[in-house]
Image (cartoon, coloured by chain):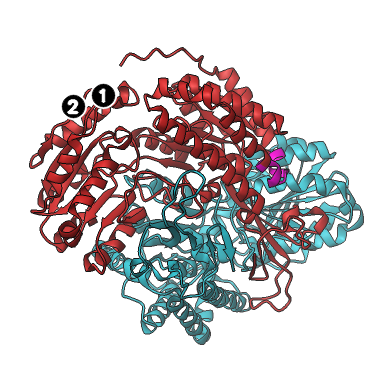
Chain colours: A cyan, B red
Amino acid sequence: MTDVVETVADTTPEELDLLLGAAVAAAPMLAAERPADRAVRLRAIADALDAAAEELIPLAAEESHLGVPRLTGELKRTTFQLRLFAGVLDEGAYLQVTIDHADPDWGMGPRPDLRRMLRPIGPVAIWAASNFPFAFSVAGGDTASALAAGAPVLLKAHPGHPRLSVATAAIVTRAIADAGAPAGAFALVTGVEIGRTLITDPRIAAGAFTGSLAGGRALFDLASSRPVPIPFFGELGSVNPAVVTPSAAAQRAEEVATGFADSMSLGVGQFCTKPGLLFAPAGSDLPRLVADRLSAVAAAPMLNEHIARGFAGALDELAGHDGVEVLTRGDTSETPTPTLLRTSAATFLADPETLTHEAFGPAALVVEYTDRAELERALAAIDGQLTATVQTVDDDPDAAAVLPILAERAGRVLVNGWPTGVSVTWAMQHGGPYPATTSVQTTSVGTSAIDRFLRPVTYQSTPGSLLPEPLRDENPWHLPRRVDGVLEP
Amino acid sequence: MTDVVETVADTTPEELDLLLGAAVAAAPMLAAERPADRAVRLRAIADALDAAAEELIPLAAEESHLGVPRLTGELKRTTFQLRLFAGVLDEGAYLQVTIDHADPDWGMGPRPDLRRMLRPIGPVAIWAASNFPFAFSVAGGDTASALAAGAPVLLKAHPGHPRLSVATAAIVTRAIADAGAPAGAFALVTGVEIGRTLITDPRIAAGAFTGSLAGGRALFDLASSRPVPIPFFGELGSVNPAVVTPSAAAQRAEEVATGFADSMSLGVGQFCTKPGLLFAPAGSDLPRLVADRLSAVAAAPMLNEHIARGFAGALDELAGHDGVEVLTRGDTSETPTPTLLRTSAATFLADPETLTHEAFGPAALVVEYTDRAELERALAAIDGQLTATVQTVDDDPDAAAVLPILAERAGRVLVNGWPTGVSVTWAMQHGGPYPATTSVQTTSVGTSAIDRFLRPVTYQSTPGSLLPEPLRDENPWHLPRRVDGVLEP
């Protein structure tokens, strides 16, 4: 792979200082706006990106090596997401408006008039990811949810797609400026060292990140050790275990093997939701069936050399582990083919930490278990995950036993599905206990992602003329709210 | 002050290990319960505490030096709070049930069936505070909200009221056991060094704390630097600035001065919401009027020697600061009288960090400003606060200008009220930007406090028989929910 990357000049410290100053100046202006004004802007970004598809997709294909069909779908997802957040703003439930009128007879003693809502958290720093040059990059989900919340965004470009980043940022900047956004509402920044500067700057109120465990943890540590610590929403990765019950292995082996092989090799295995661990009953046909299916997967280029090197290294470590057998030895060049490994639950239980290391690429490990007790012990040894899957059949007691264990460990549990292909909806949860994320209580995909960039404020005994409009009795924006304890949709 | 504190034996490492093991075992049992079952338990605790008032209140008075009237009110608040959370459980909106049915025509491509709800975060460690021996201690707000969430609680007793802690814990333990709670749902732990052990133990999933900046920050740092970092909800303190506009000073000086003096000296100034800073227009009568009112405040004992020493030290630092004048020099023994200081906004702006240090006790600093621009600069120099107040009159442009600045800095803003006396309601927010708390997005008082002990999980393509009851189509618990994007109350 010989990338010809045009140099995009790094943001200088002086430029960054100006951009941070502009973000700070924009914050109260955005906080004072109507959400509907921001909705208009999100739709303007979406329209502008759609209109620029013919410019952007070839650039993305060239820089990411992801194919045009995938990138076309990803851009569609990206603009869909912006419009979905516009709908969130139009509805306004996200503000969580809660009004308690003064009550002299409140059980613990007279209560004053109290009115609570969420407001933007302030300027946020967002790190783009390499593996979704649209959906988790400059105009991706973090940006959409932060702009929806009313938080100014400083977007750290990913060096894997520098020209696409600049082109996308130009479109975003123009679209929101035309739609009345204050200067400072959005800016792209670039540079290797700038991440550390950003997360430690006192003007930044929160960080959001999708990427590696090492990089994300380093930023989380910086965010937490500041004189004024700030929330850092890092999505760091996962091996996404999938469990096949004995009944499913007996009745649906072919279908399960096909689904697993396709999901783990999709996009050259470069999804944070790639299923990298398959728990199969010992003696089933599954390993062979998966290997057969994988043998038909064509070689395809990885995102970049750095990722290809990382994949080869992680895979060597797994494949070289005592008690791990290589079923299908794929190519681990920069244009790899899938690799399938196998081990026993006993071996897995002896060293779960190593055997749950994420190999970011087309590889997976089949762990064969002898009975449900051993399976449950193995699952209990697994750290936090973005997703966990069970493959089952109707009325399967094994699924009923395993599902609660998976729900303890993952942000999303699936039954007879596969975790790749993360839909953007109201009910999506893309997060999970550490090390899946640094922030187990939030999601980075779906409408609830907006919550990351908001904080509550209560107004006490404040006359209507001084209240933000959402908190006024007459409810001028027709918001869903809770009044004196009662929900009003 | 010569406290005769009976020794309460420290929890041994072996005992703590057993308690943590029991909490881990209880966690999935609590997570599988109906919230209504936990509601019964919260009411049982409240009833048992009310029934034990004649035992508990004298014990609290003896250990805390807070008077019987205050403690009677505080116990009422505590049991009210437990019953309020029972109501939260009965309603069930806190689960945030969100159901998206499968949709082949979803804008970004077919969406699977997705169902999201909140579930308990796991065992939590809670640090009791000294200044509310009921409401922020063993059976206080953190315990109530964690038990409501379904999170097992390990409660670190405050050494300031050891016997009350043991007595309260015995009541809680018996009440929830009688109401069917699994062993491990609640335990009291004691000891100076045990806090560090608790927050670093891998079995603890979150921490909650009310106390000093130094202590809270140390625990936050431990929570954040664990191999698996966990959320730490620390409420660390505040100086709670209050602004008097020129019009209010002209028209309501007497009323404002009386309210301020009473609020800052209430409970011997030992509230985290005590207003410690008063911004008054230069040349007003306010300092004299406040000083007059304070001269009538009787001496009263502080919670304990440690707090009295801390107060005297912090006050010496403020009073000795260049440009700070002592208007009323109170006694700073263990039974103090109020102290009032005065300075100019110019002096304040030269060293806002020192002059916003909290003196936890009956002391306050009046900062005199010359015009609104100077006032706004001074307010902009203030760190995060639990509360911020403006004293104003009708149609006062100064209040309209100042209120948004205060809302940027505080979790609760008040108009013509005083911040002490934190009501427990749906709309209360008790939190704020650091250093008021380590967790700007949450509250430790009010029904939203339950959110701290929950995390989201989404179930994908899961048949009804395997779904938790709240996520089933038939809505067996009649929960408010969002279905296919539409709120259903």
User: What residue is shown with label 2?
Assistant: B331
Above or below: residue A414 compared with residue B422: below
Q: Position of residue A141 (x, y in %)?
A: 52, 67
Whether residue A11 can be seen here: yes
Q: Is most of the magenta stretch helix, strand or loop?
A: helix
The answer to which of B384 and A106 lies nearer the viewer is A106
Subunit ID for the residue under disc 2: B
Residue span colored magenta: B28-39
Circles 1 and 2 in contact, beta carbons < 8 Å: yes
Above or below: residue A46 compared with residue B365: below
The amino acid on which the numbered mark 1 sits, given as a three-letter code, is Thr
Q: Mark number for residue B335?
A: 1
How much space separates mark 1 and mark 2, taking CA atoms? Answer: 8 Å
Q: Is residue B317 left or right of residue B384?
A: left
Q: Position of residue A44 (x, y in %)?
A: 46, 82
The answer to which of A421 and B326 lies nearer the viewer is B326
